[in-house]
C-alpha cells in the first residue's frame, strides 16, 4: 500500500486527478479535483472487500486504524496523544462461545421417593439441552417453576408470573414455553396470528431477569413437532453479559416432570391458556435443577485513533470526529439478516473517515488556530458508541477544556444541496454559524436542534459539550452489503469538507466559546409505543444495572430527580440489570403512571418517583 492515496498508487492518483480536472484547470479547480481524487481513493480503500467490513476483531479494522494514523502523521499532526501513540485502546466483546462440555452439565432432581432417596437424571449436552449465549455462567441448584410463556403484558391483561406472587419466582429456574398464547388465532390480543413483541426470546429473558429468577429453561411449544434444540446464539449474542443461566431443554425432557408435578400434561396446559387466556403457572413441587454452565466471551482490543493540531496559546480544544468501524460480515445489526457477506460501509462510515482526514489536511495547511483541534477516528460505534463513550470517560483533553464536538457520520450521499445538521441548539451561536456558512457554501440545510442521536456526538453532548452532527441522509443500502464506494457523491464530499473546515476553523478561532444549552430532544428510539422516560444510556459502563450519563431536559427522568452517573437497578416492580431489562420494564407501564425508580448513586440506593410521559 502506498503511503499516499491509501492503496491507490501515485500513478493511479495522478490519472484520477487528470480525469477529474481535465486540461487547463484553474488552481481552485485543480485543488477540488485533487481533493475529490483523495476522497474517492480513501473510501475505495476503506470499503474494499479486503477490509472485511471493518468489523471488530478483523484484520481489516486493524488495517484501517493504522491507515488513519499514517494519514494523520503524514499531514503533520501531532500523533503522540496517548503516551507516544495515537491509539486509545479499549475492549469489545466479539462473540460468546460454549465452553468445554465437561463444564456444561445439568441434572434434574425429582421429589423424594418413599425411601427418602431422590431421582437424578443427567441430561446430555447437545441432545437433551444446550446453554444459550444470552445467559451467564456458573453453578446453580434451583427449584423448578412452570411459568407458561414467560410473558408479562399489562396491555393485553396477561401475566404468567402473577399467579406466583411478587416474590415466588425469585431464585427459581422457570420453565418457559416458546412462542405466545393464541398464536394461531387471528383475533388474539397478541397481534392476531402474527408474532407480537412478547414472543421474542430476548424479551422473555429480560422479563425473567426483571422477576429476579435464578435461571431460564426454554421449552418448545406444541407446534414444534421436531422438538429440536435452538442454536446457541438464537436468543441473543451474549453482549448483555447477563449473570443468570439461560438454557434450552427439549420438550420431551420437560413434559414428563411437568405432568407429574401438576397432574396435567403440557398440551392440556397450553390448550387451557389458549382457551381462557388465563396463566397456568405452577411451582413444580419437589423438582430441582442443578448443574453448571460455562460460556466463554471472546474480546478484542479496539482502538480510537487520535491526533491534534496544537493551538496557540490556550488549552481549549475543538473535537472533530468520525467512526471508522462497521459491521464486518453482518450480524445482529445488519439490515440483511442472515446474510453473511462483507458489509462494505462506504457511506457508513468510510465517508466520514475520509472526510475527517481531508478536513485535517485542510486545517493543518491553514492553521494553527487559537484553540487546539483534536481529530478522533472512533471505533466501536456500531456496537453502541463504545469508542466515543470510552473517550469521554478517559478524555485526552479535559472535557472542561473541550469547546465543542463536530461529528461526521454518513456524509457521502449528498443529494443536490440537501444537508442534515443536528445540534444547532446545543450551544450559543451554533445555529447562526450553521445558517451563515451553509448559505456561503450554497447548502440547503435541514436542522434538528437536539444533541442526541445514534452516533458519536451523543457521547459528548451527554457530557454537556455543544455538538454539531452532519449527515446526508439515510438510504436503502444502510447496514447492507450494498453500501459500496461506487454509490457516493465525491464532488459533494469535497463541498462538505470545505464547509466542515470552515465550521471547525471558526470554533477554533472565535473569541468566546459556545455555552452549552440543554435541549429537550428525542432520545435513542427503540421502537414500539413504550412511554417516554428521558434517560441517556452510558454505553461505556456495562454492569449490574442500567447506567446513564444524564437525562434530557424537561423529561420525566429529569423531573423525577435522576442524574448523570446514576445506575438504575429497579423500575417499579422490575429488577433492572441492563438496557434490555430497562426497555422491557418500561413497556409494562403507560403514560401517566407514577412509578418508583431505584438508582445506585455514590454507593447508596436512592428511590425516586417518576411520572411517565407519552411516547416520543
Image (cartoon, rainbow, N blue to C red):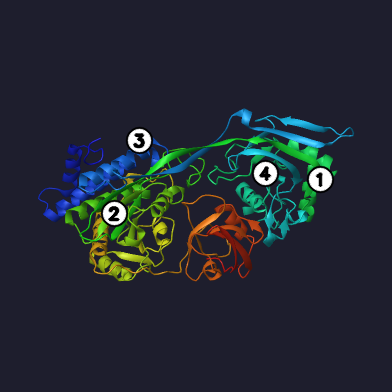
Nearest to viewer (mark 2 / mark 1): 2
Q: Earlier in the sequence, mark 3 or mark 1?
A: 3
Q: Report, in whole angstroms, how far the alpha carbon at label 2 lies from the one at label 1.
A: 66 Å
Q: Inspect this view and state whether residue 413 appears.
A: no
- Judged left or right of residue 603, residue 117 is right
Image quarter of residue 527:
bottom right
Residue 100 located left or right of residue 490: right
Contact between labelled residues 1 and 3, with CB atoms less than 8 Å apart? no
Tell me which corner region of the image, top left, top right, bottom left or bottom right, holds residue 310. Answer: bottom left
Say left or right for 323 vs 156.
left
Mark 3 and mark 2 lie on one chain; the one further toward the N terminus is 3
Q: Which residue is tagged 3? A: 50
Tag 2: Cα neighbours inside 10 Å, few (<14), some, or many (≥20)? many
Nearest the camera: 370 or 52? 370
Circle 4 sits in a helix, a strand or a loop, which is it? strand
Mark 1 neighbour density, 10 Å: few (under 14) some (14–19) many (20 or more): few
Within-10-Å neighbours for mark 3: few <14, some 14–19, many 20+: some
Observer-side mark, 3 or 2, equals: 2
Disc 4 versus disc 3: distance between alpha carbons?
Answer: 42 Å
From mark 1 to mark 4, how far is it between C-alphas?
25 Å
Q: Secondary structure at mark 1?
A: helix
Q: Residue 210: x, y in percent?
A: 64, 53
Give the labeled residue for mark 2: 374
Which residue is most to the right?
114
Can you say whether 300 is above or below 186 in the image?
above
In percent of the image, x 75 and y 43: which residue is there?
144
Q: Which residue is mark 1?
A: 268
Asked if one can make out residue 241 in the rendered structure from this viewpoint, the answer is: yes
Amino acid at each position: 500500500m502506498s503511503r499516499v492515496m491509501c492503496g491507490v498508487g501515485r500513478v493511479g492518483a495522478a490519472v484520477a486527478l487528470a480525469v477529474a480536472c481535465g486540461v487547463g484547470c484553474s488552481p481552485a479547480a485543480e485543488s477540488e479535483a485533487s481533493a475529490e481524487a483523495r476522497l474517492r481513493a480513501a473510501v475505495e480503500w476503506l470499503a474494499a472487500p479486503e477490509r472485511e467490513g471493518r468489523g471488530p476483531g478483523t484484520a481489516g479494522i486493524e488495517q484501517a486504524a493504522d491507515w488513519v494514523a499514517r494519514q494523520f502523521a503524514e499531514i503533520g499532526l501531532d500523533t503522540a496523544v496517548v503516551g507516544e501513540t495515537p491509539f486509545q485502546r479499549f475492549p469489545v466483546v466479539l462473540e460468546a462461545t460454549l465452553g468445554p462440555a465437561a463444564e456444561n452439565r445439568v441434572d434434574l432432581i425429582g421429589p423424594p421417593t418413599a425411601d427418602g432417596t431422590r431421582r437424578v437424571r443427567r441430561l446430555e449436552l447437545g441432545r437433551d439441552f444446550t446453554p444459550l449465549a444470552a445467559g451467564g455462567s456458573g453453578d446453580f441448584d434451583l427449584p423448578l417453576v412452570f411459568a407458561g410463556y414467560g410473558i408479562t403484558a399489562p396491555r393485553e391483561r396477561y401475566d404468567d408470573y402473577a399467579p406466583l406472587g411478587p416474590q415466588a419466582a425469585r431464585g427459581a429456574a422457570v420453565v418457559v414455553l416458546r412462542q405466545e398464547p393464541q398464536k394461531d388465532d387471528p383475533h388474539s390480543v397478541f397481534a392476531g396470528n402474527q408474532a407480537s413483541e412478547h414472543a421474542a426470546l430476548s424479551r422473555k429473558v429480560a422479563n425473567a431477569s426483571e422477576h429476579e429468577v435464578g435461571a431460564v429453561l426454554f421449552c418448545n411449544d406444541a407446534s414444534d413437532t421436531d422438538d429440536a434444540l435452538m442454536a446457541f446464539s438464537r436468543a441473543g449474542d451474549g453482549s448483555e453479559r447477563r449473570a443468570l443461566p439461560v438454557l434450552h431443554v427439549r420438550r420431551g425432557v420437560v413434559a414428563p416432570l411437568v405432568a407429574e408435578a401438576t397432574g396435567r400434561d403440557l398440551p392440556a396446559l397450553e390448550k387451557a391458556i389458549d382457551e381462557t387466556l388465563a396463566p397456568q403457572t405452577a411451582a413444580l413441587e419437589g423438582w430441582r435443577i442443578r448443574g453448571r454452565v460455562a460460556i466463554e466471551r471472546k474480546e478484542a482490543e479496539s482502538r480510537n485513533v487520535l491526533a491534534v493540531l496544537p493551538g496557540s496559546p490556550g488549552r481549549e480544544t475543538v473535537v472533530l470526529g468520525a467512526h471508522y468501524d462497521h459491521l464486518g460480515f453482518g450480524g445482529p445489526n445488519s439490515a440483511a439478516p442472515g446474510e453473511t457477506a462483507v458489509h462494505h460501509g462506504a457511506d457508513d462510515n468510510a465517508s466520514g473517515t475520509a472526510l475527517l482526514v481531508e478536513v485535517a489536511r485542510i486545517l493543518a495547511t491553514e492553521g494553527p488556530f487559537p484553540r487546539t483541534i483534536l481529530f478522533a477516528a472512533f471505533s466501536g460505534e456500531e456496537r453502541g458508541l463504545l469508542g466515543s463513550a470510552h473517550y469521554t470517560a478517559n478524555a485526552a483533553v479535559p472535557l472542561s477544556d473541550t469547546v465543542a464536538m463536530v461529528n461526521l457520520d454518513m456524509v457521502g450521499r449528498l443529494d443536490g444541496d440537501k444537508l442534515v445538521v443536528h445540534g444547532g441548539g446545543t450551544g450559543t451561536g451554533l445555529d447562526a454559524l450553521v445558517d451563515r456558512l451553509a448559505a456561503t457554501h450554497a447548502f440547503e440545510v435541514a436542522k434538528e436542534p437536539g444533541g442526541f442521536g445514534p452516533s458519536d456526538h451523543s457521547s459528548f453532548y451527554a457530557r454537556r459539550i455543544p455538538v454539531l452532527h452532519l449527515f446526508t441522509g439515510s438510504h436503502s443500502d444502510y447496514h447492507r452489503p450494498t453500501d459500496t464506494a461506487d454509490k457516493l457523491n465525491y464532488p459533494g464530499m469535497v463541498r462538505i469538507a470545505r464547509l466542515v473546515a470552515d465550521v471547525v476553523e471558526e470554533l477554533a478561532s472565535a473569541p468566546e466559546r459556545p455555552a452549552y444549552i440543554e435541549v429537550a430532544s428525542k432520545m435513542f428510539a427503540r421502537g414500539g409505543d413504550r412511554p417516554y422516560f428521558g434517560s441517556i444510556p452510558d454505553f461505556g459502563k456495562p454492569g449490574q444495572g442500567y447506567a446513564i450519563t444524564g437525562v434530557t431536559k424537561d423529561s420525566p427522568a429529569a423531573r423525577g430527580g435522576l442524574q448523570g452517573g446514576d445506575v438504575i437497578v429497579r423500575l417499579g416492580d422490575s429488577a433492572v440489570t441492563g438496557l434490555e431489562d430497562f426497555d422491557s420494564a418500561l413497556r409494562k407501564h403507560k403514560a401517566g403512571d407514577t412509578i418508583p425508580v431505584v438508582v445506585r448513586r455514590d454507593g447508596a440506593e436512592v428511590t425516586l418517583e417518576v411520572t411517565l410521559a407519552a411516547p416520543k
